[in-house]
Image (spheres, rainbow, N blue to C red):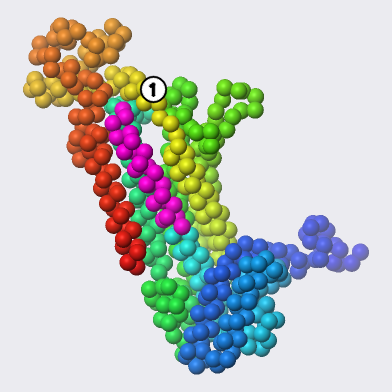
Amino acid sequence: MSDKTASNRMWGGRFAAGPSAVMEAINASIGFDRKLYAQDIRGSLAHAAMLAETGIITAEDAARIADGLKAILAEIEAGDFVFEPRLEDIHMNVEARLAALIGPAAGRLHTARSRNDQVALDFRMWVRDELQRTAGALRGLIEVFLARAEEHAATVMPGFTHLQSAQPVTFGHHLMAYVEMFGRDLSRVEAALERLDECPLGAAALAGTGFAIDRHRTAAALGFREPTRNSIDTVSDRDFALDFLSAASICATHLSRLAEEIVVWSTPQFGFVRLSDAFSTGSSIMPQKKNPDAAELIRAKTGRVNGHLVALLTVMKGLPLAYSKDMQEDKEAVFDAAETLDLMLAAMTGMVGDLTVDKAAMKRAAGAGFATATDLADWLVREAGLPFREAHHVTGRAVALAEERGRPLDRLALADLQAIHPAITDDVFSVLSVASSVRSRTSYGGTAPSEVRRQIRGWRKRLKRDARRAKGR
Ligand code: ARG
């Protein structure tokens, strides 16, 4: 038995070619970083042009490099490119192909550059594109919510705390609570875009370079505001990926809370909403069932997105400056989180866009559980001058009576209410219905339909302003 066979037995059967195959398997990133091909080629084109402009390479070599890179881009897009694990990653796959296509000039492309600044650039540009996609998806989601909120600005439903009926609210107001969350998500995405707007190219391995490169030129060519300021930080920084993952995790968490509510609301016991056939599934055995699978999967995929954030934080937390190969593990977390979040946002947009609201069921539930008790107490304070604590006590007795009689507060006889407190008049019935309760809550940010409509108008203005500003950029 040769040594090689012996070691193979130890590695296990998958690696028939011995230890070097294991090394290749753990080392190669081409299986996933091929996703960066467009960014890699774009970065190389800008780098080569700058090298020629600064006289570091000749214009002829730069032209040959550019032609070769464009041919490679076409090959990859046509599906004709052969990605080789032996060549580790996207950077070396492209460079090796460039050498095969244009010969020795290819060797000049990597002047004043390292894979460390190259990967920092490629990945940053990929994350920039994804953040822009996410911002667009969030704007689309917010628009759908605004339309549904407007439609249901006066639709009453129970508002909950502890998932117990608390006070009546409007469905429009509840949806607008999510608009606030998604608006914060959008601002986190915008802040991440703002922060990553610095170009890593030219940091080289970690110390910068002695060649007279022009980093401002490449930064501008690649659509960045300016170059990064510290070459050591540049090759060791993955904050832009963490920014994306944390924004994605918080957004996913918001989507998950709503998904949970939709699961609850769509049960026959609640019956507040009905999902469209397009966003639900049937049961193979129980014909009466309509399952909220999309909502359940949004809830579940949140675990996956949050997991990717924790994974990358954990990869980064023990790394000394500057680059370590550990950082290659950044990509799959981000790619999968991005794909997952895109899908979650699309599913939520579609699901909420066409769910049907059962206003009668919501109204019935809104009036259950003596939900307007606070309105009675407030009336006693306002109209009868009682201190709130005493009003609270009087109301408690009215609720007990209503419970005993088996009817809602607004169906109690005036005489019965007056027996509890003589200051109560007929006027009290104007506040005891669910509709008048929500109508009265006109404080800024409150649930009154008039206030909800005002907030919707405010959001529409904000979105329009953002769109105008984005066009101006
Ligand atoms: N594939 C590597 C990564 O994703 C590229 C950078 C490699 N740099 C190096 N010094 N080995 O991080």
Q: Is residue 241 above or below residue 417?
A: below
Q: Residue at x 43, y 82 (%)?
A: 217
Could you tell me which residue is drawn at 44 percent across and 52 percent down? 137
Q: Position of residue 51 (x, y in %)?
A: 51, 87
Q: Quadrant of residue 196?
A: bottom left
- Name the chief secondary structure element in magenta: helix
Rendered position, 39 above or below 241: below
**Residue 141 falls within the magenta-colored stretch:** yes
Q: Specify whether residue 154 is painted magenta.
A: yes
In this rendered view, identify the residue nearer to me: 22 or 294: 294
* Mark 1 C-beta closer than 8 Å to ligand 1: no
Task: Indicate the quadrant where residue 156 lies.
Answer: top left
Percent of width and height locating residue 100 = 70, 81
Instruction: Please say if 262 is above or below 31.
Output: above
> Residue at horizontal 32%, vertical 53%?
463
Where is residue 336? Give x, y as percent: 56, 54
The residue type indicated by label 1 comes to: Ala
Whole-percent x, y for residue 210 in the image: 49, 89
306 or 379, which is in the foreground? 379
Density class for disc 1 (Cα within 10 Å; few <14, some 14-19, many ≥20) is some
Is 100 situated above or below 270? Answer: below
Residue 77 vs residue 345: left or right?
Answer: right
- The stretch of residues the image draws in magenta is 133-156
Whether residue 442 is visible: yes
Q: Quadrant of the C terminus?
A: bottom left
Residue ID for mark 1:
361
Say left or right for 410 vs 265.
left
**Quadrant of ligand 1 in image:** bottom right
